[in-house]
Amino acid sequence: MRDKHQVQAIYHSESFYMEPLVTLPLFPLHAVLFPGMPLPLYVFEERYRQMMHMVLEQDKQFGVVLIREGKEVGGPAVPYRWGTVARITALQNLPDGTMNLWTVGEQRFRIVKIVQHEPFMLAQVMLLPDVCDSCEHRVLPIVHHATDRLEQYVRLLFSPEGGKHFVVELPNNPRVLANTIGAVLQVPLVQKQKLLEIDDVVQRLEAALALLEQEIENLLLKAAEQSARRAVHPFRPEEKVVSRN
């Protein structure tokens, strides 16, 4: 486990930044938040309750970062450098002082310098715009294919048989589509984090689509194995087990 001085050293490798820096309180989590995607939170630790009170008095924004080392509760956590600004959209204060929050992801950022560790992290971050070079020439075929595959994936998640009667409404904006795939994918968090760190929208969408294809193949294989087991051991509702005493 790294101490706070070692954590600080991680973010000093770059000395020149083109964009102005913004100071954000950070909420390290075992979750990756994508821009435009919702994230409900239950806040119970005293330090993060303090942080949220400060956030609510200001602009209702904080940074969500994936934990690289450490735990959500208790001791210090080392976050990945890339995260997403979260904006609070609704709040429920509970009688015991804890709170339920509803948030939505906004802009991606990269941590430049952690300026406070206790009671919660404050960091100077660089807000990262999404890059969409040559979107007009490359994006439409990818969007159509990714939309079809995401629809298939969602159907397979909710119904091993493909969910023929399951209605799925999906975005056709490449940025929103890439972020939606990243949020929906049931893959390790490290893979989601790699998607979040891609600046170019088309490249992010292509990388998300590659993961999506792999997950669809896994789900189809699983469905085929379940179907084969049912064929060998069919379940017959009309059959009743008679107990003999």
Image (spheres, rainbow, N blue to C red):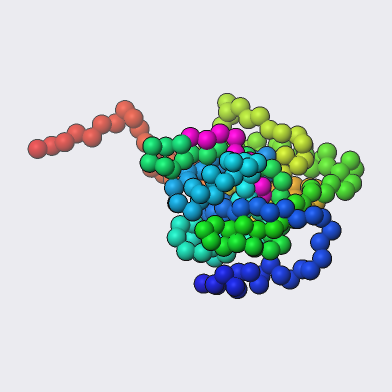
Q: Residue at x 64, y 63 (%)?
A: 114
Query: In the image, what residue occupies the spot 59% across and 41% down?
Result: 57
Q: Which residues are magenta?
A: 84-92
Numbered-mark total: 0
Camera sees residue 167:
yes
Q: Nearer the viewer, residue 112 or 39?
A: 112
The answer to whether 94 appears left or right of 131 in the picture is left
Give percent across and percent down for residue 72.
49, 57
Q: Position of residue 171 (x, y in %)?
A: 71, 34
Task: Tell me which residue sits at (34%, 30%) in the image.
Answer: 237
In x, y percent, where is residue 184? 61, 43
Q: Is residue 228 left or right of residue 170?
A: left
Dividing the picture into quadrants, the one containing residue 98 is top left
Res. 156 image quadrant: top right
Image location of residue 101, percent across then percent down: 52, 39
Please indicate whether residue 130 sits to the left or right of residue 233 in the image. right
Which residue is rendered at x = 57% and y = 26% of the image? 165
